[in-house]
Amino acid sequence: MARIVIDDLHKVYAGGVKAVTGVSLDIADGEMIVLVGPSGCGKSTLLRMVAGLETITNGTLTIGDRVVNDLEPADRDIAMVFQNYALYPHMTVRGNLAYGLKNRGVSKPDIERRVNEAAAMLEIADFLDRKPRALSGGQRQRVAMGRALVREPAAFLFDEPLSNLDAKLRVQMRVEIRQLQRRLRTTSLYVTHDQLEALTMADRLVVLNGGVIEQVGTPMDVYAKPASVFVAGFIGSPAMNMIDAGYLRDHGSMPAEMPSGTDIVGVRPDDLLLAKPEGPHLALQGTVALLEPAGAESHIYVTLDGNSAPLTVRVQGLPSVLEGQGVPLYAPLSALHPFNKASGKRTD
Amino acid sequence: MQTKRMTFNSRWLPYALLAPQVIITLVFFVWPASQALWQSMLRQDPFGLRTTFVWFQNFERLFEDSHYLASMKTTLIFSVSTTLLSMSVALLFAVMVNRMIRSQNAYSTFLVWPYAVAPAIAGVLWWFIFNPSVGILPYILEGFGYDWNHRLDAGDAMILVVVAAAWKQISYNFLFFLAGLHSIPQSLVEAAAIDGASRTKRFWTIIFPLLSPTTFFLMVVNVVYAMFDTFGVIHATTEGGPAQATNILVYKVYRDGFVGNNLGSSAAQSVILMVIVIALTVVQFRWIERRVNY
Ligand SMILES: Nc1ncnc2c1ncn2[C@@H]1O[C@H](COP(=O)(O)OP(=O)(O)OP(=O)(O)O)[C@@H](O)[C@H]1O
Ligand SMILES: [Mg+2]
């Protein structure tokens, strides 16, 4: 187990692509960090630099108490779970699990014991003698996990390990990985572009965009107080509504309490209400464009009078509104997120 | 599985479309093959005046003939050495080119060129390089105190034909190995690197086993090439000599038939070769699909 310190890491690819720019992160021993961001934002690049699969252009990387910039992947004491699992197709499951131990000169009885322990933990003991091609996607995923944890490394690195699974299995594996990580207390760096996965699994969340960190914090912090327009739009589903402050001013509904420099006001779909709340609030008027029932909840798309992009409202159950009907919308002032358009940053 | 069905309006069109292929097979394979079969059971007297039907006597004689058995052994040594040499050099090149990032295409092109050279020309090329009196290689070897003469020394002659035959095949093998290497997912190699395998170990425990379908396919192709397609190389360099040292089976067919005028024996030899080719082809088709799979 180890603390990982990423200090001002840069990656410039051969073609001049700046994939990661000045990322710093201090990962505590046993912590689970989730890197989240849109496609191409540099998540994999950052992870692969930590793994040693990609050279570090600039900056220092410390795992445990060693600077590992120039160490081979094998010497960094990390294990990685790949998106396509990268199981060795010509070896049995047992061979896959044992490979890393054999290379490190672990004794035969020890390999046997550790493989069996890992197999029991991941419930793959029944197909230890099968080849990967004879396994289902979920089982392969477990074997890939097993191969990582059988080595008892200082850190786990995951690169979108669940993205090849169907929705149901993904939820199940998400829970299992999280439980396993809690039990083993192994420092983990987990990459995903799925914001729900990020929210549910992380001890701390790192939102990356264009190779730069937008925000670091616990999932609840990031959700409750997104540091930028980008984070606000990326974390939370349905995405946060962004209302132009100019519109509010024109309609005389811009709250005086908003900090100076605010020209975008964000409201989560849950915080938009059809009924007038107690206390100070924002009031708007709009028309129901579409009603979208989704089981336990429903989404109502409301176009504000004179504003093109519809707002999303999330309500429990089925609301008693009709499409085309005019509705008032309210949002408590405490639920508003003020942003500056030019900097993209939060203003409060 | 669903297959697409075409219907032809004319009854004769399908036959007409198949005809060229069928005619080519008949003229260039079935006809000569049956001729050879027929000939292999005939014997002519030395003056070509009388021909007798002798059943399998030609074959029986062949298997008692020490020259023929020696030629079989020569062929075995020759084809195994040629296959090993051309495949290992090709694999080495493929691995090295695969590591390059920008110059892959340029190197691949250069490495493929030898394949376009006709076997006889390649043979002449090597004949010059190895020529004991004017060749560059014997000259260099002499500097090391080795007296190269493939006209007298059986070992030298064998090395010469193996090198000349393998050289050309390297290009072909190289292309297949390179394609094979490209098809191995990079993440497997990365996973092995994280799993603590050194470069060499990664090659032998991950890359090489994953290449095994390619390797097996090439092995069959190369053995077939060495056994049947190297006539030109032998003819241009050693002509089977010295003292039969490089007289492989295909070359012996030609020598016995057209130089020695023993048509019956020559035909019997070519029938045996045909059986070997058929066997190798069957092995290739049967095995490649099933055995060498991971
Ligand atoms: N080997 C490479 N050479 C050049 N540029 C690269 C290379 N690998 C990645 N890039 C570029 O670096 C940027 C970041 O890529 P990266 O793979 O880290 O993104 P990602 O966040 O993992 O995306 P995804 O969610 O799609 O996996 C991209 O613009 C990509 O095109
Ligand atoms: Mg990625």
Image (cartoon, grey):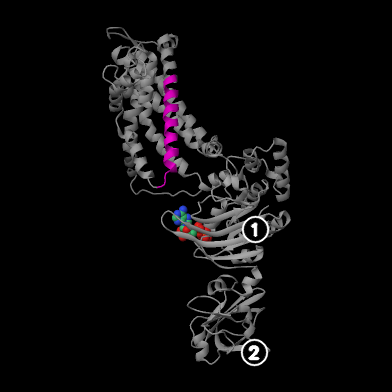
Q: Position of residue B294 (x, y in %)?
A: 56, 39
Q: Residues within 10 Å of mark 1 (few under 14, many from 20)?
A: some
Q: Is residue B242 above or below residue A39?
A: above
Q: Position of residue A295 (x, y in %)?
A: 65, 73
The residue tagged 1 is: A169
Q: Is residue A241 above or below residue A214?
A: below
The answer as to whether the residues below labels 2 and 1 share one chain is yes
Dividing the picture into quarters, in which one does residue B260 lie?
top left
Q: Position of residue A288 (x, y in %)?
A: 56, 84
Can residue A162 be seen here? The reply is no
Q: CA distance from mark 2 to mark 1?
A: 44 Å
Q: Nearer the viewer, residue B64 or A25?
A: A25
Left or right of residue A75, residue B260 in this image = left
Q: Nearer the viewer, residue B166 or A338?
A: A338
Earlier in the chain: of badge 2 and badge 1, it is: 1
The residue tagged 2 is: A280
Judging from the image, mark 2 belongs to the subunit labelled A
Q: Label 1 is placed on what type of residue?
A: Leu
